[in-house]
Every structure is written in structure tokens, then in C-alpha cells.
Amino acid sequence: MIIFRYDDSFEGLLSAVFDAFTLKQWPQQILGPDEVQPLLSEHVHQVETTQEKYYRVSQAMEKRLSPVVLKQLTYVWFSQQIERATLIFNYLCKVFKSRQDITTNYADADILAIRKLAKKVSHERHYLMMFVRFNAIDNHGDKVYFATVTPRYDTLPLTVDFFQDRFADQKWAIFDTNRRYGYVYDLKQRHMMEIDEQSDLICDGHINDIYLGENEKQFQKMWYRYCQALTIKERINPKLQRQLMPVRFWQHLPETWHDSH
């Protein structure tokens, strides 16, 4: 078994594709720096990440692949699934080896797997855009709209352009509590941010009440009561509600909280 080990970056993965065609070696697995090596591996190649390799493979991808397929590969990368590197590697090698367009050959296991995983990430991206709820916090006298999220996949980078366009006239921040990073927008630029685990800003996945704006708790209660008032009891369908609005997002939706939340 041949193993390629890379630095767990997208540039490194494309460098691995370059090395495979240069060395004429086709590994069975692509492993990150901390992944355990199989016992039966015969040869391990350490991929050296370079901008030249990355550029040449990325240029070839743009020539051979449609924008839809490029987006699919991007989504698979942000899935953060263990198998993502090997899937993308096998996919690209098959595309570059073939003289025909095979990107819709779903009889191929790798091509089908890419499509399925990309679809899951795409759904999660849409969920994130729909179910983000901002809370006004007082940042040293400056109002900032802050939201916490817990997406299944690393979809936050895939949504920040949407939020910047949608809320260009407001200061906001979105923080992924699972991955401990987020983005903040200051009306001019968007920056990546991290919050120390010792900080008390976020408690149990929610913004600490002591940081909320003066009337924020009241607005949350009003929003909850407003949604309850609009509800037609005879048409309540819990099963359909859970399909359209998965329960795992409810912790971030004030309209699903009780008054005592």
C-alpha cells in the first residue's frame, strides 16, 4: 500500500496530485500529519507543499472542471470529513487521466461520493444562512450583533459573503462554538476571530446574559410571543417542522425557547 502524507492544507492536497503524476505513483490513502499510518503500508511519500505545484494543478482544474464541479470540491473540502482528502485526490486523478468528461459518471464510487457529500454540505450551508439569529451585545458602548452557531460541517466560511452583503450597514460577528473561530465585520472589513476558552462571553453555546444589550432579553421574549401568536394550533405538524427546521438548530432560535430561557 502506497501512502501520501500531506500538511492538511488544500494547497498541500493539490501538491499531492502534482507529485502523483510526476512520480507515477497512485496512493491508496492521503493522510494528514496526525493521522495513523496503516500497518501494511509499503511506501510513504511525504508531500512537499509549494505554490508552483498548487498553481499548476489549480489552473488545470479550472480548465477541465465546470464551476459547479469546482464548487462541489470546495464543499467537500469544508466538510472536514476524514475521507475528504482521499476522495478529492482520487476524483482529480481520474479527471486528469480521462480524455472525456467523467464528472457525471455516477457509476464511479468516488464521483458519486463527492456529489453526495457536497450536497450534504450545501444543505448545511443553507441551514446556516436561514437559522442564524443575532443578539445585540454591548461592546464598550458600541452595539455589535453577535451570533453563535454549531454547524455540522465547517460551513461558516461558505456563508460570510452572504452575511456581509446582507448586513453591510451593521457591525456583526458570527462564532462557531464547535471549531472555536468566527468572523467579525466592522463596517469596513471582515476579520477572522478567535475567543479564548477561558472567556465568559459564551456559556453553554449561548452569549452570556451580562454582555447582552439593554433591551435584548425583552426583544427575545417579544419575538417568541410574536411567533406563538402567529401559530395556528390546528395546523401544527411537529414532524414536518423537524424536517424543515432540524432540532439541532433550535438552541440558537429564540422563537423555539420558552419565556424562561
Image (cartoon, helix red, strand yellow):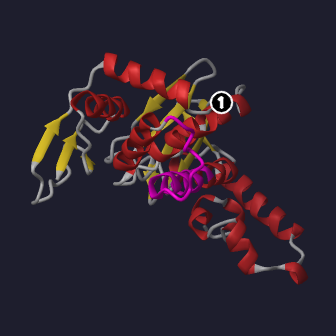
- The question of residue 109 being in magenta is answered with yes
Instruction: Give neighbour class at mark 1: few <14, some 14-19, many 20+ (Cα, 10 Å).
Output: some
Q: Give how far across and how far down residue 52 sits, in percent.
A: 33, 16
- Residue at the image point whose x is 33% and y is 42% from the top: 196
Which residue occupies the foreground of this view, 86 or 9? 86
The residue under the point 21% across, 32% down is 47
Identify the secondary structure beneath mark 1. Answer: helix
Rendering quarter of residue 11: top left
Rendering coords of residue 128 (x, y %) = 62, 50
The segment highlighted magenta reads 99-122
Q: Please, what is the three-letter code of the amino acid marked with disc 1? A: Gln
Instruction: Decide: is 226 above or below 66.
Output: below
Residue holding disc 1: 164
State the residue at coordinates (18%, 48%): 2
Rendered image quadrant of residue 72: top right
Q: Percent x, y for residue 49?
A: 26, 26
Based on the picture, tell me whether residue 96 belongs to the magenta stretch. no
Decide if residue 86 is on the left or right side of residue 158: left
